[in-house]
Amino acid sequence: MDAIVTRNLSKVYKGLGKGHHKSLDSLSLTVAANEVFGFLGRNGAGKTTTIKMLCSLLKPTEGDALVFGESTRTRQARRLIGYLPEQPYFYEYLNPKETIAFYGKLQGLTRAERDRQWDKLSELLDLREIATQRIKGFSKGMRQRIGFAVALVGDPPLLILDEPMSGLDPIGRRMIRELILRLRDEKKTLFFSSHVLGDVEQICDRVGILVKGKLVRAGRIDALLGSAVNPVEVICTGLAVADVTRLKEQAELYRAMEELHVFRAATPEIANEMVRQILAAGGKLVEFNPLKETLEDYFMREQTQDGTVRMEGAIQ
Ligand SMILES: Nc1ncnc2c1ncn2[C@@H]1O[C@H](COP(=O)(O)OP(=O)(O)O)[C@@H](O)[C@H]1O
Ligand SMILES: [Mg+2]
């Protein structure tokens, strides 16, 4: 059975005035059991909105969502989900051990079960050394580990993590990546959001790309990249100014150094046509480099094709 199914899931926040802007627009998505699914999008794309609806913290305006076949409107669905919020909130005067015990109690675990949970989670998340220190004063990385442990209390089959690597240093990010893979080995399903592509590229079975509330693509990373048309870098020399001007109409002039011109053509076809013109004009071809597209390039391209998304600025 699929871990997550959403059908036309939509959200319009009240109080945003007229204009019917949908923060999430008809999301239909399926995540298989035991899959690691990366939910990508820039800030404001609608990732947290989606996650909150999956965790029944927000009511959909339209559509619905199922978790292992249970409607997210039911209490049963919530029990199947371990949730790590974007900014986990803790009782600052409790220590990690008390925190895990507290959430265990909320779930009705017995004392023995709570102790077992602590043994397992403190080992998994390396919490032993800080077991009896108050959370107040903990670093972002330590908090994220505790947040992860809280999400795992009760051993839910589905983990929904909102930007789990955000704000962490490289070591912290790696720890979260390894944790996600370890949990996948334990047959859990992981759904996590991110605006940082490098992390996602390495560990996800599939990704979905959200742009302004709309899912523009979903699929296996290799398939998404495989179907993509790769740009080609064309490096040439010996061209007159008029030739360069003409070529610039077909491709971006990426760099110009002395005699050398580096163009970036959007497709191999355009690149081939440019080569023909370069040679016909008496120029020389120095290099012809098909560029391997990273997920980041792909992501940026998807966003521009959408037409509604501005390009300036990096993904933040
Ligand atoms: N409580 C809210 N009230 C009104 N608008 C909101 C609220 N929460 C989020 N939004 C808007 O919904 C859109 C999606 O936000 P969000 O789901 O937080 O995106 P992401 O998590 O991808 O950064 C944004 O335009 C945001 O301003
Ligand atoms: Mg968010």
Image (spheres, rainbow, N blue to C red):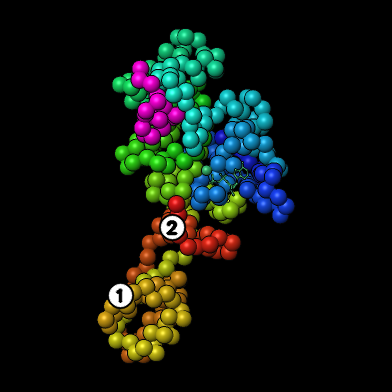
Residue at image mark 2: 314
Residue 242: quarter of image? bottom left
Q: Is residue 108 left or right of residue 116?
A: right
User: Which numbered marker is on residue 287?
Assistant: 1
Among numbered discs 1 and 2, the one appearing first in the sequence: 1
Q: Is mark 1 in CB contact (under 8 Å) with mark 2?
A: no
Which residues fall within the magenta stretch? 132-148
Can you give x and y, in whole percent of width and height, for residue 143 in the image? 40, 30
Give the Cα separation between the discs numbered 1 and 2. Answer: 29 Å
Residue 1: quarter of image? top right
The stretch drawn in magenta includes residue 181: no
Q: Nearer the viewer, residue 292 or 41?
A: 41
The residue most toward the left is 258
Q: Nearer the viewer, residue 64 or 148?
A: 148
Placement of 311 over or under 171, stated as above or below: below
| Nearer to us: label 1 or label 2 | 2
Placement of 251 over or under 193, stated as above or below: below
Q: Is residue 302 left or right of residue 5?
A: left
Can residue 233 be seen here? The reply is: yes
For numbered disc 1, what is the local secondary structure? Answer: strand
The stretch drawn in magenta includes residue 144: yes
Q: What amino acid is labelled 1 in the image? A: Glu
Can you give x and y, in whole percent of width and height, for residue 121 in the image? 40, 22
Q: What amino acid is labelled 2 in the image? A: Ala
User: Which numbered marker is on residue 273?
Assistant: none
Can you give x and y, in whole percent of width and height, for residue 157 in the image? 51, 28
Placement of 214 over or under 290, stated as above or below: above
Name the residue at 49% across, 29% down: 89
